[in-house]
Image (cartoon, rainbow, N blue to C red):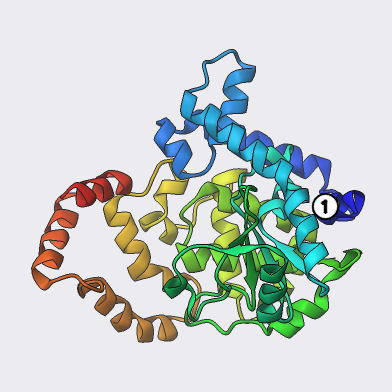
Amino acid sequence: MAAAVGAAWRYPEPPDENEATELWAAVDGLVDRAPTVEDLLSHRLDLFAARRWRASGRRVPAELAERERRAAVGALVVPLVFERIRSAYDGDVIPMKGPVLAARYPDPSLRAFSDLDLLVEDPAEAQAQLLAAGFEEVDDPALFGDIHHLRPLWWPGLPLGVELHSRPNWPIGLPSPPTSRILAAAVPVADGVRMLPPAYHALLVAAHSWRHEPLRRLRDMIDVVALAEAAGRENVAALAREWEAERLWRSTIRAADAALLGAQWPTGLRLWARNLERVRERTVFENHATRWLSDFWIMSPRAALARLPETLAQELSPVSGESWRSKLVRTGRAVRNASVRRSVHDDQLRRH
């Protein structure tokens, strides 16, 4: 079982060494350009920074050393958690993100993750079998009523969560590819374990990143480029056309190429994605501009305009449980802090 578990986290063929060398050299360059440790943390480049600084004799801050330790522990416990999953659940599982992406890095411990994302044909049945075997549910159940995965699980004592997915996490306003098609494309790599072709995984990772917050982190761009090079870019582009996600893929890969491989920055993206170009955290203004404008980079202008009133209404309305007075105070602070780093602004809001 141990050999099968280990094999499940790697693709049959490794990425091209020349492409990989160019990519990882570019990542080292990003580390050197980042203004502060906080910016490295924002872009999830902290593990690369710790490795690079230690190799050059530079002191590694305690916070980065602790993150290295946690990432190493996470990589080590993957086989233990996965073995318990395979012992408890008799259906096929398709690992995504996390350790699958880490397998494409020079060292898996350079790509931290906090859970195993598994696509399964019947999530409810899989959840029931894992609970019966000793897994426990965590987090507030109200948060997982109608999203792409069930309430997270964990095995007591092992610091790695498990999320069972019923469908991909796809941007609102774009047609999501049928889960049945994704399941059918997965290739067997071990007993009960299947792996997505790199082209499928590249698109799913790009869409997931865009759904959470478009072009927020350089690590997302690293993931995308690593998968695209493994898949062959023409194959990812063809699949994106088939899934009606061509604009999403084009915007993502252009930003990734500009940030990592020296390509020219698309003019429009500089308006709200300069944080990637400058290897720094987003400002308050850039954060809001992303919400207002990002739809125009993944869908037709007509469709993006149709969604804009809903987006603006969400921006201008109080959040659940917030009074209009509190909303106005928060808006005023956001205007004053337009050029302030987002984390600093959020900290001020918490203290206020």
x, y percentage for residue 75?
A: 70, 43
x, y percentage for residue 50?
A: 57, 27
In which image quadrant can residue 200 be found? bottom right
Q: Residue, x 66% and y 38% (percent of image)?
A: 73
Query: Which residue extends farthest left?
Result: 325
Amino acid type, residue under disc 1 in the picture: Arg
Residue 315 visible in rendering = yes
Q: How many marks?
A: 1
Identify which residue, 116 or 329, lies in the foreground.
116
Secondary structure type for disc 1:
loop
Q: Residue, x 66% and y 73% (percent of image)?
A: 127
Q: Is residue 93 above or below residue 220?
A: below
Quadrant, the N terminus: bottom right
Residue 250 visible in rendering = no
In which image quadrant can residue 288 be found? bottom left
x, y percentage for residue 141?
A: 46, 72
In which image quadrant can residue 318 be found? bottom left
Identify which residue, 182 or 98, lies in the foreground.
98
**Disc 1 packing (10 Å; few <14; some 14–19; many ≥20):** some
Q: Is residue 294 above or below residue 23?
A: below
Q: Is residue 101 above or below residue 211?
A: above
x, y percentage for residue 241?
A: 67, 78
Q: Is residue 37 left or right of residue 79?
A: left
Q: Is residue 288 above or below residue 274?
A: below
Q: Is residue 126 left or right of residue 338?
A: right
Q: Is residue 310 left or right of residue 303?
A: left
Q: To which residue does mark 1 refer?
A: 10
Identify which residue, 279 or 155, lies in the foreground.
155
